[in-house]
Image (tube, rainbow, N blue to C red):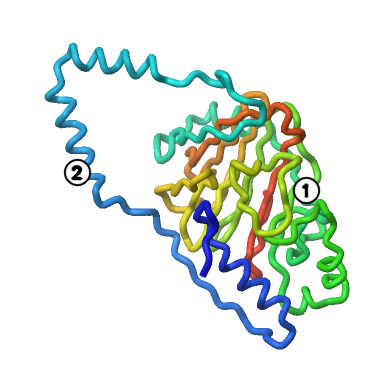
Amino acid sequence: MTWSETGEHSTGAFHSLFNLRNPHKERENQRTCKSEPFLKPKMSLMVISYFKSKIQKSPKEEKTTTDNNKQNLPQKNQNKPECARSEQKSVNAGGLKIPSKVWENLTRPSAKVILDPNIADPTLKLSEDGRSVRTKTHKEFHSSQSFYEYHRKRAQQYNGWMCVQAKEGYSTGKHYWEVDVKGKCDWRVGVVKESAPRSGFINLNTATGYWTLRLQLGSLIALTEPITKLNQAPPAKLGVHLDVEEGQVSFYDVMKRKNIYTFDTEFRNCGKIYPVFGTMEIDKPLKII
C-alpha cells in the first residue's frame, strides 16, 4: 500500500491497472464504500472552551483582539505571484442554504463541457457525446485499439492517473457545470491549468496546477498541499463554479444548495483553465449534467 506525499492514496490506481493489463486475470471487481463524514470527538470540548474564554474576556480585551485580527487579515491578491500556489479557504461549508436569487446568479453561466478523448488516459472509456466517463473493463482495454492507444502515449495524454480534461478551456469569465456523482466510491473533479503535468503518478494538487476535490475510500478531500479533509458526506450532485478573473474555484452540493469548498488563487499567466475529471470505477460512469 503506497501513499503520495500529499496523502492521496494511489493503491487503487495500481490495482485497477494491474487487473486491466494482465490478460490472465480477468475477474469481477466488487466494491463497496462508506460515505460517512469525518468525526471530531474533541469538538465539544473545543466549543465549550471557546465560549468560556469569550465570557471571561472583558469588553476592552475583546475589542483589542478584534482590532488586531482585522489588521492581520490578508488582503485578496495582495503581492501574490503570478499563477501562484493556492490560498485555500472553506466558504459556507455546512452553513446556511444559499438563497434562491444568489443561486440563480451563481449557476447562470452554464458551460457546455465536452471531454477530450485525445487527452484521456487510455484506461478510460468516454461516451459518444463526451459527457460521461468510466474505467474500461478488462475486455475493452485489451482490444487492439486500446493497446495501441496505451503504447502510443502522446505527450499531452494522461498515462498514470485515470483522468481526462475538457476540450474547451477558459481564460476569462465565469463558468459553471454540474457532475452526477451519486453512489460513486471514487472520483476527482475540478480544474487544471493548461501547462500542468499529466504523465505518471505525480501529485495532482495545487502545487502542480490542479484545483480539485476527490472522493477516495469514502472520504471527501480537497487536494491542497497537504490535503484538506472535508468534514461532510459526499454530495450526490456536485456543482463547480470557476471565476477566472477573481481566481476562485468553488464546489457546491447542488441538492442541498450549499458550498463545500473554495480555492482562492491567481490565474494570471496560467494559460487556459480546463475542467478535469477522474474515476477508477467500471460500473458507474462519472456524468456531466
Q: Which residue is drawn at 87% across and 70% down?
A: 148
Q: Position of residue 157 (x, y in %)?
A: 79, 55
Q: Residue at x 56, y 36 (%)?
A: 250
Q: Residue at x 47, y 61 (%)?
A: 218
Q: Residue at x 64, y 60 (%)?
A: 279
Q: What residue type is labelled 2?
A: Leu
Whole-number angstrom distance, CA of label 1 to CA of label 2: 48 Å
Which disc is residue 45 wearing? 2
Q: Position of residue 104 (x, y in %)?
A: 59, 30
Q: Using residue 172 as the reference point, say whether residue 54 is left or right of it.
A: left
Label 2: few (<14), some or many (≥20) within 10 Å? few
Q: Is residue 257 visible?
A: no
Between residue 16 and residue 114, name the one nearer to us: 16
Occupied quadrant, residue 163: bottom right
Mark in front: 1 vs 2: 2
Occupied quadrant, residue 68: top left
Q: Is residue 200 above or below residue 243?
A: below
Q: Using residue 63 as the reference point, say whether residue 190 is left or right of it.
A: right
Q: Which amino acid does label 1 sit on?
A: Ile
Residue ranking furthest to the bottom: 24
Q: Position of residue 63 (x, y in %)?
A: 24, 13
Q: Where is residue 139 in the image (x, y as percent from the top left)?
A: 76, 79
Label 1: few (<14), some or many (≥20) within 10 Å? some
Q: Can residue 193 be seen in this view?
A: yes
Between residue 183 and residue 146, name the one nearer to us: 146
Q: Is residue 38 above or below residue 208?
A: below
Q: In this view, does 52 lie above or below 212?
A: above
Q: Name the residue under label 1.
A: 114
Q: Is residue 129 above or below residue 222?
A: below
Helix, strand or loop at disc 2? helix
Helix, strand or loop at disc 1? loop
- Which tag, 1 or 2, sits closer to the chain's start? 2
